[in-house]
Image: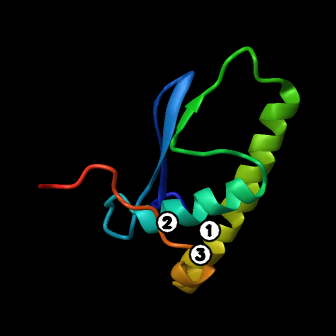
Amino acid sequence: MEKHTQSVGLPPRTALMFLDEYGNNSLLIKSLFQQEVLKRGVLFGAAHCISFSHSSEDIDMTLAAYFEALTILKSALEDGDIESKLEGTPIQPVFRPL
């Protein structure tokens, strides 16, 4: 998993990056992670913006959702079967060349 995920930035604002086998950003891998955390009640875009308004329960719920989603992601990566685990269309780039 270490070669497919990275946490970048400085606390309290960090972001998760999802990388393919060549080290390039992977929207397919990010899509599966995002799908799985959303199922568990966590809205995820990429950045973490932790503030004092987050309770210990909020943080625990988020960590539990991340753990479950990363477990599913690890299994999909090991099986080479990410697309079949997606329940919708993978996310697309926001900015595209003209």
- The image shows residue 9 at horizontal and vertical percentages of 44, 30
* Residue sitting at x 69%, y 54%: 38
Q: Is residue 56 left or right of residue 77?
A: right
The disc labelled 1 sits on which kind of residue?
Leu
| Eye-nearest disc, 1 or 3 | 3
* Residue sitting at x 85%, y 27%: 56
* Label 1, residues with CA under 10 Å away: few <14, some 14-19, many ≥20: many
Above/below status of 96 relative to 79: above
Which circle's residue, 1 or 3, is located before the other in the chain?
Answer: 1
Q: Nearer the viewer, residue 97 or 2?
A: 97
Looking at the rendered structure, the secondary structure element under dot 2 is helix
Q: Which residue appears farthest toward the right when viewing the image? A: 57
Q: CA distance from mark 1 to mark 3?
A: 11 Å
Looking at the rendered structure, the secondary structure element under dot 3 is loop
Above/below status of 14 relative to 77: above
Q: CA distance from mark 1 to mark 2?
A: 8 Å
* Residue sitting at x 62%, y 79%: 85
